[in-house]
Amino acid sequence: MEQDLLTTIWHSALQIGVFVFFLFVGKKLFLQFKRNISIQEELVHHDNLAFAISIVGYYIGLVLGLVPVLSGESEGIITDLINLSLYGLLVLILLTLSAGINDKIVFRFFSIDKEIFDDHNPGTGLIMAANYISSGLIIYGAMDGAGPNFFPEMYDGVVLSGLITSFVFWSIGQVLILLITIAFDKLLPYDLHDEVEKDNVAVSIAYSGMMIAVAMIVFNGIRGDFYSWSENLTGLGIELAIGLVVLVASRIIVDKILIPGRRITDELVNQEKPNLGIGLIEGLAYCTGAFLVLMFV
């Protein structure tokens, strides 16, 4: 009994230590891709709200990605340390790749760094925070659950198999969220990039809600145990189709039922002062629809 208690304490301490370590490494990695910035300078001396929002989103995304790494049964302290290190490193790499891909593809028409560090644009900070949170959800879903051992002859075959399935499902999730957000951008009756550059926070709130909602739906489709490529991908396709219908319905409900007689677009972009409340309601509607998909699909 006492031995079991000591093992549990050691395992918990190991998990906490690895978690804190990767938060520290994540901070260094985050700053590595920024242009000679100081967190203290931006937050304390410049009171940069945009940067504060983006870095909070980064840490939320990092924590979401690390959740499946810290769960599961103990296989011994040494084995746990190796597995936690491998998967934690993978989380950092995938989060950095996800954020970088979205930055360069979805928001390729303007400079994110300029908007955040020069203009202190809180709307851009919100979108980057949503980007990190969405990436964390995709990583969480890709790494969640158990799977088969593709390499039974290898000592750590199950670990390698898990890394492969995690990377494949992360890749699928990343492609899906890119395609859907780009399509959403094309369908908008206004130019998203122009509105963000004009510091239209209402539009940024709505778009951020949409990004997180799409990530929640993709997360729901790729999480869980691995059975076979065909079975898991078929399930993902069904849940994605249902989820997109729910998101469209959420937008219609807000537009036609909650604010009858007014168009969301008019409230967001066709008036002198964009309506932050309507942006918040639209973003929340997307996330609520995605939450319903998580609960019932």
Image: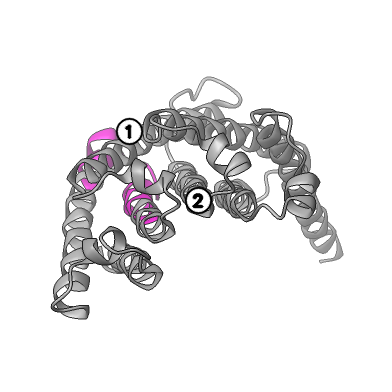
Classed neighbour count for the residue bearing mark 2: other residues with Cα under 10 Å, few (<14), some (14–19), many (≥20): many
Query: Can see residue 221?
Result: yes
Q: Is residue 229 left or right of residue 165?
A: left
Provide the secondary structure element on which disc 2 rests. helix
Q: CA distance from mark 1 to mark 2?
A: 16 Å
Could you tell me residue 272's position as x and y percent? Answer: 34, 63
Q: Main secondary structure of the magenta part?
A: helix
Query: Can see residue 72?
Result: no
Classed neighbour count for the residue bearing mark 1: other residues with Cα under 10 Å, few (<14), some (14–19), many (≥20): few
Q: Which residue is mark 1?
A: 175
Query: Residue at horizontal 27%, vertical 44%?
Result: 191
Provide the secondary structure element on which disc 1 rests. helix
Could you tell me residue 109's position as x and y percent? Answer: 38, 30
Query: Residue at horizontal 28%, vertical 42%?
Result: 232
Image quadrant in which you'd find residue 157:
top right
Image quadrant in which you'd find residue 220:
bottom left
In magenta, the rendered stretch is: 212-235
Q: Nearer the viewer, residue 1 or 112?
A: 112
Are circles 1 and 2 on residues that touch, CB within 8 Å?
Answer: no
Q: Which residue is mark 2?
A: 133
Q: Is residue 295 magenta?
A: no
Could you tell me residue 176's position as x and y percent? Answer: 29, 38
Could you tell me residue 37's position as x and y percent? Answer: 73, 35
Q: Is residue 64 left or right of residue 9?
A: left
Q: Is residue 228 magenta?
A: yes
Query: Residue at horizontal 77%, vertical 42%?
Result: 21
Label located before the other in sequence (1 or 2): 2
Q: Amino acid at mark 2?
A: Ile
Residue 244 vertical position relative to residue 289 in the rendered view, above or below:
above
Q: Amino acid at mark 1?
A: Val
Q: Is residue 189 left or right of residue 106?
A: left
Q: Nearer the viewer, residue 166 or 283?
A: 283
